[in-house]
Image: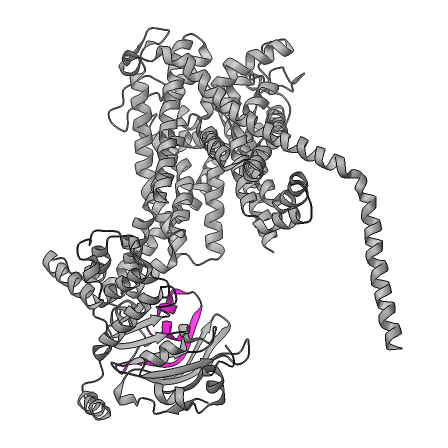
Amino acid sequence: MAINQTSRAADEQLSSSQRIKRALSHGKQGRISKNTSNKVMLGVFRVAAAITTLVLVAIIAYVVINGLPHISPDFIFGWPHGVNAEGGIWPTIVSTVYVTALAMLICTPIAVLAAVYLAEYAKQGRLVGIIRYAADALASVPSIVMGLFGYALFVEAMGFGLSMFSAALALALLMLPIIMRTTEEAIRAVPRYIRWGAYGLGATKWQVVSRIVLPSAFGRIATGIVLGIGRAIGETAVVLYTMGQAINLPITPMDSGRPMTVHLYLLANDGINMNAAYGTALLLMIIILAFNLFARHLSRKSK
Amino acid sequence: MTSVDRSDAGENQAPRKRELALVSRSTYLKEKGLQYLFFACAFLAVVTVLLIFAFTMMQAAPVFTDIGLANFFSFTWAPTEGQYGIMSLLAGSGLVTVGALVLGVPLGVGTAVYLTEIATDRVRALISPAVDLLAGIPSIIYGFFGMVIIRPVVAELTGGMGFGALTAWLVLAIMIVPTITTLTIDALNSIPMGIREASYAMGATKWQTIYKVVLPAARFGIVDAVVLGMGRAIGETMAVLMVVGNAPVIPESISSPVSTLTSQIALDMSYSSGLHRTALFGMGVVLFIISASLVGIVRLLSKMRKG
Amino acid sequence: MTVYQAAPTPEISAISTANFDFWYGDFHALTDVNLNIAKNKITAFIGPSGCGKSTFLRCMNRMNDLIEGTRIEGSMTLDGADIYAEGVDPVDLRRRVGMIFQQPNPFPKSIYENVAFGPRLQGVTSKSDLDDIVEESLKRANLWKEVSNQLSKDGLALSGGQQQRLCIARVLAVQPDVLLMDEPCSAIDPTSVQKVEDLMAELAPEMTIIIVTHNMQQAARISDYTAFFLQEVAGEPATLIEYGQTDALFTSPMDKRTEDYITGRFG
C-alpha cells in the first residue's frame, strides 16, 4: 500500500516536470528574436544617451565658436554705447553679480536654519508635511510668476522700485527651497553616531548642531549653495520685471540695472548686434559652468 | 576588599546625596528661542507660498468682477478690444508641453537607463557630468540656441519663419531631459541589485531584464520624473518666448506661431495696464495652480506608494 | 522575579533603580528592573540581542530622551538624586554620566579638538588648560604615546581601536563619575580589545563603569558584577533575570535561564 503510494507520487512528479519541459519547448521559437531584440533595444538606449550628450556638446561648441572671437578685455570691462549696444557689457556683469550675491545673502541663512529645523528639531507630523509641500510648491512656481509677484509686491506695493533689492528678494524666494533641500539632505547625511557622541559629552541640542552637525555637513551645504548661485545667475524671467532693463552700474541695493541674461534676451530679440549676443552668451555660460564644476569639485571633496 | 567597601559606604552615607543640576532658565530660554527661530525660517516657505497665491490673486481680482470668467476663459485674446480670453494661450501651453514630453521622456528615460544599466563605469563618468551640466545651462541660452540654430532648420523643413510649437518642442525637450534623467537615475538606483541578478539568473537578456523587471520596479519614480519634467515645461518662459512666435491664437499647424501663458505674461508685462494687467495676474494664478497641483500629484503618488 | 547573588547594597551604589519600566511608544521594552550599580566597580550587562540591556544603559544618561515617544516608569537615581525628576537637565546629567558607543564615533575634527570638545562646552577657553586636559586625558586613555606628535591629525584617520580609545579620552576629558560603555569592543580588532580592557581596569578604582557586552568571556574577565537580562517571549518586555557578583553568577547561577545562557544553550 505504502509502496504503491510512493511510486504514484513519483509518477506524478515525473509527469509534471515533463509537462513543464514540454510547455517550455513551445517557447523556444522566440529564441532568435530574443537576442535580436536585446541588441536592438540596447542600441536604442545608447542612441538616447548619445543624443543627450551630443546636444550638450553642440550647444557648448556653438556658443564657444561664435562667442570666443568677440570676447576681449574691452568687451568684458567696457560699457555698451550707441543704438546697437556696441562696446562692452561690464555694467550687466556687475548687475548680475550684485543681485546674485544679495539674493544669496538673504536666502542662505534662512534656508540653512529652516533645514536645521526640518532635519533636527521637527517632529514628523502634519505641520512638517505642510512645510515640505510648501517648499516643493515654492520650488515649482514658474519663474515668470515669481517675477510677476515680485513686481507687484516688492517693486510696487513695498515701494522698493525696480532695483537690485527687489530682484534679489524675488530671486531669494526662488532659491530658498533649493538650498533648503540640499542643506537638509546634507544634515541628514551626518551619521547619528557622531551626534550621540556629542550628546553623550553633555552638549545641548544647539551645541550639537552648531559645533558638530553643521561643520560636518559643511562640504555638502556649500555644494548646494554653489549650485544655487549657478541657477540664480542664469535666471531671467524673475529679474526681467523686478530689476529693470536700463543699463546702469548699480552702487546701492536700491539702484536698478540690467543683468546679463536680460541683456542677452534683448540683443537676441532685436537681432541688431548678434556678435555681442554671442559674447554675452559665452561669458554667461562660462560663469555658470564654472560654478557647476566648482560644485562638483566641492561635493567630491566632501565625500 | 569587602571591608573597605563598607567603610567607604559608611563614610559616604551622610553627605552621599548629590543633587543633579536642574535645567537653567537661561539655557532653556536660549534653546527654546533658537528652536522658534528655526521654525520661523522653515515656516517662511509656507508663508511665502500663501503670500504669492493671495497677492497674485488680489491683483487678479478684477478678472472676476470686471472681466468676468466667461470672457477670461474664452478663446479670444485681444486686450485692445477688451477680449481677455486665455484658452488659446492655455492650449498653446498644453500643446508645447505635450510635444516636449513626447520627445523628452523617451530621451530622458533612455539616457537614464543607459547610464544605470548599460554603460561602463568609464562612459558613465563622462556622460553623467554632461547631464548635470545640461541641467545647469540657463534657459535663456537654450532659447538663444533654439532661436539661432533650431529655428532656421525648422524654417527650412516646413517653410515659414520657423517660429512655432515644433521649435518649442525641440528646445523644451532638450531642457527637460536633465530633470527626467536625474530623477529616473535616482529611481533606478534605488532598485536592489538582487532583483536584476535574479532576472539574469533565469536566463533573461539585458533588454528583457530592463523591460520586464527594472522599468516596472521603477515606474513610480519615473512617473514622478515625468510629472516634474512637465512642470518645468509648462513653467518655462524665456526659451519658449524666444521661439514660439507669440501669436495668441489656436495655431494652424505645428510650425505656425503660437503663444503660451508664460510667454504672453513676459511679453505683455512691459506695457500692460488696467484690465490687461489684471488678466496677466489672472494667468499667473492659473500657472501657480497648475504647478502646485503637479507637485500635489507627485506627493499624492508617493503617499499612495508608501501605503 | 529577579534572583540576587551577593548584589551591591544601596549604600555602596552609584546608580539605583526601582521598579523601572521603559517604553518605545507602544512597545513595552523593559519591565520591573531593580538593581544597584556598585560605585567605582565594573558592572557588566549580558544577555541575548534584544534583551533591553543597551536600552537600559541608555536610560542611565537619558540618551533615550533623544528618541521620540519614549517613556519610563519607576525610579532611577544617581548618587541618591532622581535622574528623571522634573526639571533635571539631561545635558548636565550626561556630563556626569559619560558614554562610549559600539561604533567608534570621533568627530570629523582633529584629535586635539575631539578631546577638547567637552571642556570647551563647559567654557574652558585657556589654551594651556586645554593643552593640559588633552594631554592628561589621552594619557589616561593610553593613547598619548601613539598620537602625541600628530594631535592635529583628523580623528577619523586613526585605526578603529585607536578611534575607540580617542572616544574614551574624549569622555575622560569631562571627568564623568560614571562611564557607560555600549559594546565598546564589538567593532574593533582583538589587540585593541585588550587595550580597552586594560584601560577599564585602570579606570575602575575612580570611576563607576557599566559595560554592555555580547561576549561572556569579556564579562567574566573584567567585571565585578554581572546582570543578566532576557526577553523570554517575543513582544513581551524584557527584564533582569539574575544579578550579583560576577564570580558567583558565572560559577553557580541560581536561575535556570542564566545557566542556560552562560553555558551557551541559547542566545
Image spot of residue A165 (x, y percent): 31, 31
In magenta segment, residue B282: no
- Identity of the residue drawn at 31% across and 72% down: C180
- Identity of the residue drawn at 35% across and 33% down: A294
Residue A189 placement, left or right of B18:
right
Q: Is residue B188 above or below residue C101?
A: above
Taking depth in this image into account, of C36 and B58 the one nearest to the observer is: C36
Image spot of residue B116 (x, y percent): 55, 39
Image spot of residue A6 (x, y percent): 84, 71
Q: Quadrant of residue A38?
A: top right
Q: Quadrant of residue A96?
A: top left
Q: Quadrant of residue B261?
A: top right
Q: Is residue C11 visible?
A: yes
Residue B81 placement, left or right of C30:
right
Residue C49 placement, left or right of C120:
right
Q: Is residue B266 visible?
A: no
Magenta segment: C55-81
Q: Is residue C33 above or below residue A169?
A: below
